Amino acid sequence: MRKPIIAGNWKMNNTIASGSALIKELIPLVKDAQCEVAICVPFTLLPAAAELVKGTNIKLGAENVHFADKGAFTGEISAEMLKEIGVEYVIIGHSERRQYFAETDETVNKRAEQALKNGLKPIICVGETLEERETGKTEEVLERQILGAFQNLTAFDMPANIVVAYEPVWAIGTGRTATKEQANETIAFIRKTLVEKVCAKCGADIRIQYGGSMNAKNASELMSMPEIDGGLIGGASLKAEDFSKVVNY
Ligand code: 13P
């Protein structure tokens, strides 16, 4: 049985003050959630957020992690630094990082390996652009991203520690959601790739989220699909009421 996980990705939003207020508002609204709940917040907010979510059912996540243990990597954050704060999840390979910060399948793989090595749970993001979908390249792109990201990861105790987020780039922040059939079908393809080409035993148990304009209105419809094991929520995670409605789909 795969327990659904709904995670907020705050991206570059909220200061310590506004983020703390949002978390305080959120805690009572999601306390009875049937799914796993996580919020992935900017680095500067992590220590305050860790204090606030202590003793609640909200898990804490970061939005990236560097692949080296430590050293001369100005501006980067290590897995050890995140662990020290009490971070459990870390988003890796978000399309915004691939698009604006030269993230590649290779660096996604290195970051995921480093996260797992240090006891952090990666949320590995994959997804095709609109052009790729319209030219029939979706499966080719997703297979390349999955095989790249999971290279040599089988040694770690998957599947409980790895989450995949399928985020079609054309649905992120656009208000244009994949239909529940599209999302379900594409996630089924990702799972088939995991089972056939990555880990025959554990592929079926890895949780795969949908992300891309998932919100209070469409969450229950998307979550009703058998292959969709949760959501990675951007815009709708920035308001406590909206996010709680997704969590309590
Ligand atoms: P939106 O929910 O704002 O479309 O963002 C999705 C996303 O990128 C989550 O990682």
Image: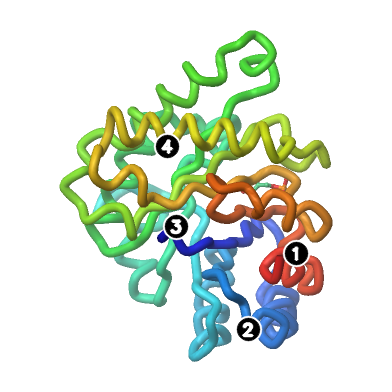
Q: Residue at x 59, y 30 (%)?
A: 99
Residue 216 visible in the shown view: yes
118 sits left or right of 5 in the view: left
Cα separation, mark 4 vs mark 2, equals: 29 Å
Q: Single out the mark in the foreground, 1 or 2.
A: 2
Cα separation, mark 4 vs mark 3, equals: 21 Å
Which residue has dot 2 on it? 32
Ranked by sequence position, the earlier of labels 4 and 2 is 2
Which residue has dot 4 on it? 191
Q: Single out the mark in the foreground, 1 or 4.
A: 4
Which residue has dot 3 on it? 90
Is 44 located above or below residue 182 in the figure?
below
Q: Are marks 1 and 2 in contact (CB under 8 Å)?
A: no
Cα separation, mark 1 vs mark 3, equals: 18 Å
Residue 227, image x and y in percent? Answer: 53, 45
Residue 149, image x and y in percent? Answer: 35, 35
Q: Single out the mark in the foreground, 4 or 3.
A: 4
Q: Secondary structure under badge 2?
A: loop
In which quadrant will I find the C terminus?
Answer: bottom right
107 sits left or right of 98 in the view: left
Cα separation, mark 3 vs mark 2, equals: 24 Å
Disc 3: residue Cβ within 8 A of ligand 1's nearest atom: no
Q: Residue at x 76, y 42 (%)?
A: 173
Disc 4: residue Cβ within 8 A of ligand 1's nearest atom: no
Q: Secondary structure under badge 3?
A: strand
Residue 160, image x and y in percent? Answer: 33, 59
Residue with the most extreme top position: 135
Which residue has dot 1 on it? 238
Q: Residues within 10 Å of mark 4 (few under 14, many from 20)?
A: many
